Image (spheres, rainbow, N blue to C red):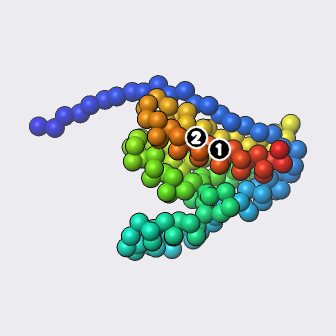
Amino acid sequence: MSRTLEDTKQISVERFSVISSKSFEDVVSAIDTSIGHPDLKLFRRDITAAKSQAELEEIVHRAVGPSDLMEFTRFDLGEILRKEQGNGAPRSVRMVAGNPLIMKQMVRRVPDAGSYAPVTFLIDERPDGVHLSYDRMASFLAPYGDTEALAVARDLDSKVETLLQRAAGA
């Protein structure tokens, strides 16, 4: 006989935001030069073929950029807005980025961390400038009470926030 358990956690999310006076293109370009952009099909193939932890780590280190992060995917939300509003619609891009080795450190301690990693950040145009926003991983993991996973999450938050601040020109 199988059992089903239900559990609900209340999670309060901290959002980090910085506003840039730089152009949208310049902000996105600054992020693009700081994160890795591996061919994900080849990346997955190489990860699967890795024979050891050391080999896997080398594959990841080659894939990440100077920020220690790599892009997994991006969603051009502005493209969808332009279909309705025309070329004057504000630009908006959601990027999903991370580092599989960092994710592994968190998931080992808190399996639910896999729901939040890799992380998402949003770059969007508004009347007061280009907003760069990120929901802090530490805020997602705090309710789980694991100090080691929380320390890794805080380090990840620092990497992402530094990336966004530099891209914004702050």
Q: Quadrant of the C terminus?
A: top right
> Label 1: which residue?
158
Label 2, label 1: how far apart the Cα atoms are? 6 Å
Crowd tier of the residue under label 2, counting other residues whose Cα lies within 10 Å: few below 14, some 14–19, many 20 or above: some
Amino acid under disc 2: Arg
> Looking at the rendered structure, which numbered label has been put on residue 97?
none
> Looking at the rendered structure, which numbered label has been put on residue 154?
2
Left or right position of 18 against 118:
right
Tell me the element at label 2: helix
Vertical arrangement, residue 12 with respect to residue 141, above or below: above
Give the image location of residue 89, x and y in percent: 80, 46
Tell me the element at label 1: helix
Amino acid under disc 1: Ser
- Quadrant of the rendered structure where residue 17 is? top right
Tell me whether the residue at label 2 lies in contact with that at label 1, contact meaning CB atoms closer than 8 angstroms.
Answer: yes
Residue at point 69% right, 44% down? 161
Left or right position of 3 against 36:
left
